[in-house]
Image (tube, helix red, strand yellow):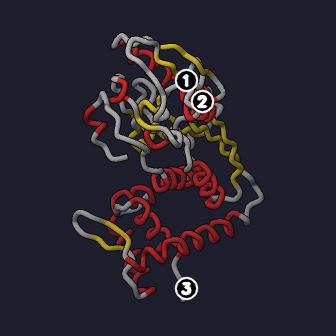
Amino acid sequence: MTLDIDAVKAFLTVADLRSFTRAAEALGSTQGAISVKLKRLEDRIGEKLIERTPRLVRLSARGTVFLEPARELLAAHDRAVASLTAVRRHFRLGIATHVGGAEVPTLLARLNAHDPALTIEVQLDDTRDLLAAFDRGELDAAIVRRDDDRRDGEVLAPEQFGWYATPDFVYRAGEPLRLAASSPSCSIRDIVTGALDAVGIPWTQVFLGCGSFAVAEAVSAGLATAVFSCRLAPPGTIEVSRKFGLPPLPATEILLLSTLSDPQSREALRALAMAFREHRPASNGARPRFRNSQMADSSI
């Protein structure tokens, strides 16, 4: 049995995006062409791979089994094609430390498998610093939290934040709230302190610097409380906004920014976006309060 690579790619794109419309947009094709390719693949295999209703697109039982082998087939094909050129390309990617989590190794592995001729350079930093580097042309792409009123970029997912501390963390009303933050320039730190100042809750900064990973260690040790994305809350911590009467936090979005326009790079970005959405972990802990009620109802 010989399988058509374009048909396999159409199947994988539909499976990842759960939509024929979005798959057609991602592949620069039409819904009709995608449907024809998928039908051809299903006829060749003799099994239904995608179940489609007016409201739902999902994998069939056979499609679920075929998914990973199909990825391996496409990756092998792309490696074979890439081996025909000696030219190596560079991809400078910035990932905000408060955005990247357990999915980061998967993102990098997916990029490497997608294009072995691509040399990936990764920079982890605060959103504000990454945006400045991106605007200076020092990064080809960046995954960041939407900052202020910035409108460019592809929305990857909604992002919701909560106040996290250990279950035995002690805070008494009227006392300064002990805070941990990653750096003085962190925009989330500004949001946190502004929210506390707005409701008259005193605060003191007891841990600063070393990035969000060090902040997570400080919070897990019971030293302070800090704001994290709900899906990246440190293990062993709980959401404490209701417990301590802390103010609600604005929800936001995760953006993929890029200046790349050549077909190979755009295809790599598409693989990056799909990997992020597919492997994005669920939120951890109790559901916090949000200032933006519409975003609070969004699925994460």
Amino acid beneath label 2: Ala
3 and 2 marks in contact (CB < 8 Å): no
Give the residue pinned by disc 3. 2
How many numbered circles are shown?
A: 3
Q: Crowding at label 3, few (<14), some or many (≥20) Cα neighbours within 10 Å?
A: few
* For discs 3 and 1, the disc positioned in front in the rendered view: 1
Amino acid beneath label 1: Ala
Residue 285 to residue 289: above or below: below
Quadrant of the rendered image containing residue 239: top left
Image spot of residue 173 (x, y percent)? 38, 16
* Element on which disc 3 rests: loop
2 and 1 marks in contact (CB < 8 Å): yes
Amino acid beneath label 3: Thr
User: Residue drawn 31% across and 31% down?
Assistant: 290
Q: Crowding at label 2, few (<14), some or many (≥20) Cα neighbours within 10 Å?
A: many
Separation of residues labelled 3 and 2 (CA atoms)? 55 Å
Q: Which mark is residue 51?
A: none
Quadrant of the rendered image containing residue 197: top left
* Element on which disc 1 rests: strand
Give the residue pinned by disc 2. 218
Image spot of residue 36 (x, y percent)? 37, 75
User: Residue drawn 66% across and 45% down?
Assistant: 91
Please indicate whether residue 226 sits to the left or right of residue 285 in the image: right
Q: Which mark is residue 180?
A: 1
Q: Earlier in the sequence, mark 2 or mark 1?
A: 1
* Element on which disc 2 rests: helix
* Residue 149 appears in the picture as rendered: yes
